[in-house]
Amino acid sequence: MPLLRVSSLSKSFGGVHAVRNVSFDVEKGMIKALIGPNGAGKTTLFNLVSGFVLPDAGEVRFDGRPIRGVPPCQVAALGISRTFQNIKLFAGMTALENVMVGRHVRSRSGFLASMLHLPSTWREEAEVRERSKELMEFLGIAALADAEATSLAYGQQRAVELARALASEPRMVLLDEPAAGLNMRETAELARLIVRIRDRGATVLLVEHDMSLVMDISDEVVVLSYGEKIAEADPRTVQKDPQVIRVYLGEEEC
Amino acid sequence: MPRLGPMRPALLRQVAIFVAVFVTMELLAVAGEKSFLLTQVTMSAYYTLVVLGLSLLMGYAGQISLGQAGFFAVGGYTSALLTTWDLSAQRSVGWVAGAARVGLLITRTDAFGAQVLTVHPWPALVCALVLTMTVAFVVGIPVLKLKGHYLAMATLGLGTIVYSIAVGTARLGAADGISGVPPFPFLPGIGVGGSTGARIVNYYVACGILAAVMLLLQNLVHSRVGRALRAIHGAEDAASAMGVDTPYFKVRTFVLGAALAGLAGVLLTHFNGAIGPSEASIMKSVKYLAIVAVGGMGSLWGTLAASMVLNFLSLRGYFGTLDDAVFGAILIVVMLFAPQGILAIDLRRALRLLRPVRGAPVDPR
Amino acid sequence: MSLAFFIQYLVAGITYGTIYAVVGMGFNIIYNTTGIINFAQGEFVMLGGMVAVSLHPHLPLPAAIAGAVLVTMAVGALIELIFIHWLSKPTVLRMIIVTIGISILIREAALLVWGHDVRVLPYFTGNEISSISLGGALISPQVIWAVAVCAVMVMLTTAFFQWTMLGRQMRACASNRVGAAVCGLPIRNLVTLSFALSAGMGALAGCVVCPITYTQYGMGTGLAIKGFTVAILGGLGNSLGAVAAGLLLGIVESFTVSALPAAYKDTVSIAILLGVLFLRPSGLFGAGAATRA
């Protein structure tokens, strides 16, 4: 059984078909990429899977369980985490605090326990803090812990957002254009990082424009155009698909 | 510094400063034969509870409320009503007799020397808090779905409804409010209200309650919940994506803020011996808002300081007839020039800047 | 309820309704030009009546009213120039709070100048006992004045925004500020004009109902809340919607008072406000702009 199964998913916004009858599977332990020209519906698809948008038709199943209509906070509790195209870090909080919020679903202290600072709370706090620091070390950004998150350089913010998404030890991570704004060296590092993330046990679904990244690390690629799926196969095959080439004609991709 | 143990070192320091400041104030006031000033400080402390509740909601959760005074009034009026409603005539009715036997009702002498049977202040307090929190919960669920100025106007409207009810209901004393509210007995000899002789006791009771509340709120703000609230304020969508149940946290924070306002309402009503509809007015809510704005959204100590100072000055009549105008002006100035608050400097972070840096943020590559 | 009573309540409702409608329109004019919700709108109504009452001993009534309108327009323009003109990107929320502060200052200034007293202008025609009979009910001719003046104001304003160059420029400001600037429109001046216009409308309405409703330093706040309710009910930005909503609110309020104690009168408008905000924030005649948060 695939970890994520998207079946005949459709969504229109006021007459515009953002996503039209899209179906694909993501197997456990796979790195799958969603590619397509701008406006192809990739981010909408992410929003549909993570619960931010309700589909007009179709189904989404996570580990066999239907998650259509499940609100984002519950989707996170089920084990799906995500990043955003335009990096939504929490302003006014340090990088470490941002990552610690990522671990929200793995902690339980509520209002009363927190106010009274019960032993269960401060033990949990220590654990969350330790795990978050470990994660930042894994991503090589441990030194940024106390910096205000939105004051960091773009590439560093991306890393923090990634750490935040991983803090809940999700079974599946949705990465929305993680390489946007990164140079070639940074992108190569990102690629290595994503592979290590997969090796640590998370399944990865990513949306990307950067073809080198996609071809380098993906096990499978889904190509969208105007909301429809036009190809789904391993990177080599997709690269040679005439329809895909036609859709990308005129776009400069390296 | 790591917070592995029961209390954060920073918090310990802050509480120590708080105690030192307030004890010093008391000693100075008594030494200078001006102990009457302590009365206004006591009242300021109670009003500060209201402001802290609002600060939590606005500064941390990022939700505006122009109706905080309404909750103060619900708490205060409930307690006032219960502790002054003479049930002597119903003495023989089943539940009244039963309640009296259990101690929920007490017989006392009122201001005019008559014997009355009223609810004991403790159960009245519980009722007041329960009612305030229930109203906040019921109202909060739909209201907190609104954002920005719609939320502001909705809460403004709700506060006005409370005011209308207070002013328009005969049972609540209409425009005159309720008076003759008895003192609140905490422990034998220690309570809220009473004669001027109990002034110093009252002062320390108020400070103690304020300190306790501050402790709880500081713990809350530096916890998972505090982070969740700040996350909601920072980027609500991303907070949801990280598993934060935003409606739940918003409503709970709203209710907590209401509870603090209600508690302050009860205590201040017993302290003053009376409550009037002006406590529910828009102007009061605006004042609380102005103080939170000055104190800095997201800085509880800053808000406490601003609240103590501004409330004290206002209660002493320092602003004279221009009292409302002063707060209006404060609101304008802060909102135009420093929307994050004048005292928005986070003292912790400011102090950290002064310490030698252990590991400066460095490009990891 | 007899026909006479019914008409009495209806007329009272229409009278108050026209004020609400004018205040609502004032909100819309400023909102349409700047995206700001000006909580001080109610104070303009109060100022109109107060200033007219002060000028009246020295000037004939029409001149006093004209003077009051001009003074209030100047106040409106001044408010914009002092507090808003230089702001680059004010959020709606921040500006509501600022304008709440401004309304407090105006109110306190009014208290300082005119005190707690309730003031009243003389009836334009006749006096407080002259009346016209309508279906058994006795209606003051002032009501006719109020409705007529406000109706004319509404028509002129609508015509202004619809057909004059200046009006169209002001509308352009709201829908696309950058675009309007690029087209060379004097944005800052148009904003000032919108404040002056709103203030003038409010002041005139205040003068015309003053004989019936009296005026007092504190009446602005309640009017602001009701005006906001009306503006939202009619669809924020929709001026004709505000008119309909204003009349509706006035009438509903009036008939509710016939059933509930007068002290709960304000609760009606707030209940409607909450209802609209919860159920249909784009208003009855939704302009769509209300979803901006």
Image (tube, coloured by chain):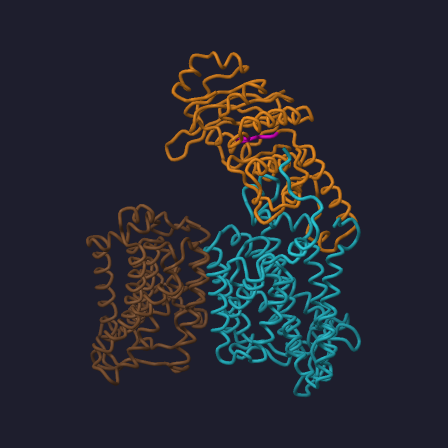
Chain colours: A orange, B cyan, C brown
Residue C230 appears in which quarter of the rendering? Answer: bottom left
Q: Foreground residue, C26 or A142?
A: A142
Residue C54 visible in image: yes
Queried whether the magenta region covers residue A239, the answer comes back as no
Between residue A196 and residue C121, name the one nearer to us: A196
Query: Relative to residue B254, is residue A143 depicted above or below?
Result: above
Is residue A136 placed above or below B50 in the rendered structure?
above
| The magenta stretch spans residue A176 | yes
| C125 shown above or below A217 | below
Residue B287 in the image: state x and y as whole percent: 53, 68
Residue extending farthest front: B356
The image position of residue C10, as x and y in percent, is 30, 67
Residue found at x 47% / y 62%:
B157
Q: How many marks?
A: 0
Judge from the rendering whether residue A81 lies leftward or rightward of residue A241; answer left or right: right
Instruction: Classify residue C189 as left or right of residue B130.
Output: left
Region in magenta: A173-178
Drawn side of residue B149 relative to residue C59, left or right: right
- Quadrant (top left, top right, bottom left, bottom right) of the N terminus of chain C: bottom left
Judged from this view, the residue extending furthest toward the bottom is B113
Residue A128: image x %, image y %? Answer: 72, 42
Q: How far across and how far down the image is residue A51, in percent?
A: 54, 35
